[in-house]
């Protein structure tokens, strides 16, 4: 099971990213098991499979996936809408947007800051927001990102993305631990995992 956990997608960097994300979500649930969770660009709602959310909302532009999600998770809420303009009926305590900014070819990268600010309007005061992004996009727009981070009490940038190609199971496991070393200890990588906590009144 441990090996399967690390090698499901066979991309060491992606495995490392999700390890970070899952740890942060698990910590949020330990503090409050009744958190309202909003998953922007939710895809196939893998996080709803991984965690037992009491309140989960997923948004995606892929109508087919949203319809499947509704069938698979009738207790949760799903919307086939644009994440750059979506407004939730109830704001979330914890919000995420993973594998979208600079990763999803259907997403307009010029809309990133607009989308981030819109997502922030869907977060409750003191809430958290997790997302990832290409390092180059962050550097090219660093002033705008720094202004965005001012919406929160604190934020943390974690570099990752040293081993992004698919590997066989044996190499994946080795490169995963190398990814953990380069990212966690040397702070190197081509991508950023961003953790924003404590949304101020906006």
Image (spheres, rainbow, N blue to C red):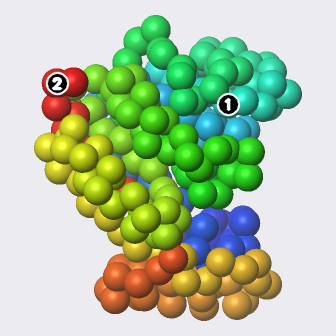
Q: Which residue is mark 1?
A: 60
Q: Is residue 27 above or below residue 38?
A: below
**Which quadrant is the N terminus positioned in?**
bottom right
**In the rendered image, which quarter is residue 200 located in?**
top left
Q: Is residue 72 visible?
A: no
Q: Position of residue 51 (x, y in %)?
A: 52, 39
Viewer-proximal residue among 8 and 130: 130
Provide the secondary structure element on which disc 2 rests.
Answer: loop
Provide the secondary structure element on which disc 1 rests.
Answer: loop
**In the rendered image, which quarter is residue 157 located in?**
bottom left
**Which quadrant is the C terminus positioned in?**
top left
Q: Is residue 78 left or right of residue 182?
A: right
At x 67%, y 30%, the residue is: 60
At x 47%, y 69%, the residue is: 135
Residue 126: assigned label: none
Kindly give the residue lying farthest to the top in the view shown: 89
Q: Is residue 131 above or below residue 29?
A: below
Q: Which residue is mark 2?
A: 201
Viewer-proximal residue among 31 and 94: 94
At x 60%, y 91%, the residue is: 174
């Amino acid at each position: 099971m441990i090996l399967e956990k690390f090698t499901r997608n066979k991309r060491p960097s992606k495995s490392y990213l999700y390890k970070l994300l899952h740890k942060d979500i698990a910590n949020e649930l330990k503090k409050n098991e009744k958190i309202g969770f909003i998953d922007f660009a939710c895809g196939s709602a893998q996080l709803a499979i991984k965690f037992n959310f009491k309140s989960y909302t997923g948004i995606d532009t892929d109508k087919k996936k949203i319809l499947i999600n509704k069938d698979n998770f009738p207790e949760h809420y799903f919307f086939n809408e644009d994440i750059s303009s979506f407004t939730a009926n109830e704001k979330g305590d914890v919000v995420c947007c993973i594998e979208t900014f600079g990763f999803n070819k259907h997403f307009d990268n010029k809309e990133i800051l607009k989308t981030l600010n819109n997502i922030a309007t869907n977060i409750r005061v003191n809430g958290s927001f997790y997302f990832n992004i290409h390092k180059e996009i962050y550097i090219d727009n660093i002033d705008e990102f720094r202004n965005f981070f001012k919406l929160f009490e604190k934020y943390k940038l974690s570099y990752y993305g040293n081993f992004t190609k698919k590997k066989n199971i044996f190499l994946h496991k080795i490169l995963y631990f190398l990814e953990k070393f380069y990212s966690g200890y040397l702070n190197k990588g081509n991508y950023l995992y961003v953790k924003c906590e404590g949304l101020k009144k906006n």
